Structure formats: structure tokens, C-alpha cells
């Protein structure tokens, strides 16, 4: 765990214990993207465990239309079993201003939704603000810089030996699954980092996406 993140463990515990078992708090070390989860409180909400990678950083945080000043709040996503989760995330920077972590709060709305259903005739629905995102969202230099750093860390973490084609495919699969290629310029950055051509990266993407 990055040394600047450990002081946030009491903060995570305080939030989790204040709001109870339906409130999950997750601390990520983004200098190790493939094993970014370094601490989790009430991990039963979404199943977060230490050693897991980040999931929603690109799609729901960086590409969220409400992402400003290194945080976004109250975006929605669903778990695999259909539960709606209300989430907020804040990035953590070191003294040089580089992003090194993220604090996420995930709240399971199941109990509240059941209560709302029972009171629905008195509380008509007003719609949900899910924090719409998209690959055509306006991306500023801040987002590009963060994603470039993630790419560097992912590739550097694999530089323990000469990378084989299978190694490269695993890297591309991980990046694609995490939404990195939704960000403009990511293909070029990954190609340069792996010492491959853009055509090769596109070919690998076709393979991991099942098009070949």
C-alpha cells in the first residue's frame, strides 16, 4: 500500500461504521492497478476484497459528466444480482499532484427501495440521476493524464520478463475490461508502451473481444 493511503484507513472505517452494513468503503492504490484494492469495509455490498483491480474508475468516474475537482458523487450502477448501488468516488494525489489512489463509497439501496415501494402511492417517483457517461464525453487533460499513468503502471507491473503474445493479450484484455480504450489516445499510448504497432493493438482487441 502506498504510504499516503494508510492514514485513510481510519476514515474508511469511520464512514463504514457510521452508515452500517449497507455502506461499503473501498480504498484503491492506483499505482498497482491490477491489484488496486488495498482496504475494504463492509465488502459484502459489492464483493470487494483486497487484491482485486479497480472496476468503475474509467466509465463511472473519469467519464462521468459530473466529474469535477477529482471527485464525483451519487452515480448509480447495478451488481450482477440486480441490486442498485449508489456510489461516490474521490481521487487521491501525492505531493507532486499525481493520482495515486481512490476512495469509493458504495451504498446498497435495496432496503430503501423496498421501503419506497411500500410508500409509492405517497412518494411518486421523480426519476434517477445515474450520472450518465459515454465515450463521447468531453475529456480534459486531467483525465488523459490519469489514464496515461494507469497505462504506465499496468505495463510496468508486467515488465518482470520479456512479454509474450499471451502476456500482451492479457494486458489488452484487462485494459479493455476496465474501459481504458474508451479514452482518446489510449491506443497510441499502449502501443508505445508495449513496443507494438497500433495495428497489432487493434488486432489484439479483436481477439479479446471475440471478433477473431
Image (cartoon, rainbow, N blue to C red):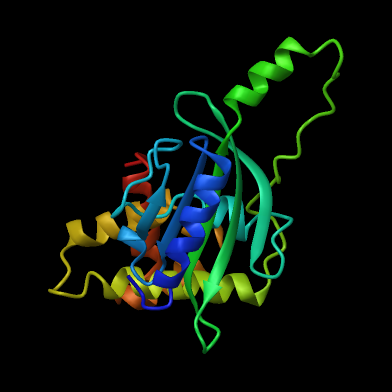
Q: Is residue 129 above or below residue 98?
A: above
Percent x, y of residue 167: 20, 60
**Residue depicted at 52% across the width and 54% down the height:** 14
Q: Is residue 37 above or below residue 191?
A: above
**Residue depicted at 69% across the width and 60% down the height:** 67
Q: What is the residue that sits farthest to the left in this orientation?
A: 161
* Horizontal side, residue 172 vs residue 185: left or right: left
Between 30 and 86, the one nearer to me in the picture: 86
Which quadrant does the N terminus fall into? bottom left
Tell me if I can see residue 70 in this picture.
yes
Between 142 and 73, the one nearer to me in the picture: 73
- Report which quarter residue 124 is drawn in: top right
* Horizontal side, residue 101 vs residue 162: left or right: right
- Report which quarter residue 76 is drawn in: top right
Tell me if I can see residue 181 in this picture.
no
Percent x, y of residue 139: 67, 66
* Horizontal side, residue 119 vs residue 49: left or right: right
**Residue depicted at 47% across the width and 67% down the height:** 8
Percent x, y of residue 172: 34, 57
Amino acid at each position: 500500500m502506498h504510504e499516503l493511503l494508510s492514514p485513510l484507513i481510519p476514515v474508511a472505517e469511520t464512514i463504514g461504521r457510521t452508515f452500517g452494513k449497507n455502506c461499503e468503503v473501498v480504498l484503491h492504490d492506483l499505482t498497482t492497478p491490477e491489484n488496486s484494492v488495498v482496504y475494504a469495509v463492509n465488502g459484502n455490498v459489492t464483493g470487494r476484497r483486497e487484491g482485486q483491480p479497480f472496476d468503475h474508475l474509467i466509465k463511472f468516474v473519469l467519464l462521468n459528466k459530473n466529474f469535477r475537482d477529482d471527485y464525483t458523487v451519487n452515480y448509480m450502477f447495478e451488481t450482477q444480482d440486480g441490486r442498485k448501488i449508489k456510489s461516490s468516488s474521490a481521487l487521491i494525489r501525492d505531493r507532486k499532484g499525481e493520482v495515486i489512489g481512490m476512495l469509493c463509497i458504495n451504498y446498497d439501496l435495496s432496503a430503501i427501495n423496498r421501503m419506497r415501494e411500500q410508500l409509492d402511492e405517497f412518494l411518486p417517483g421523480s426519476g434517477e440521476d445515474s450520472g450518465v457517461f459515454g465515450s463521447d464525453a468531453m475529456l480534459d487533460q486531467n483525465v488523459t493524464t490519469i489514464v496515461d499513468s494507469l497505462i504506465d503502471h499496468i505495463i510496468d507491473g508486467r515488465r518482470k520478463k520479456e512479454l509474450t503474445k499471451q502476456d500482451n493479450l492479457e494486458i489488452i484484455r484487462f485494459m479493455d475490461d476496465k474501459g481504458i480504450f474508451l479514452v482518446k489516445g489510449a491506443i497510441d499510448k499502449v502501443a508505445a508502451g508495449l513496443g507494438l504497432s497500433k495495428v497489432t493493438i487493434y488486432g489484439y482487441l479483436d481477439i479479446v473481444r471475440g471478433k477473431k
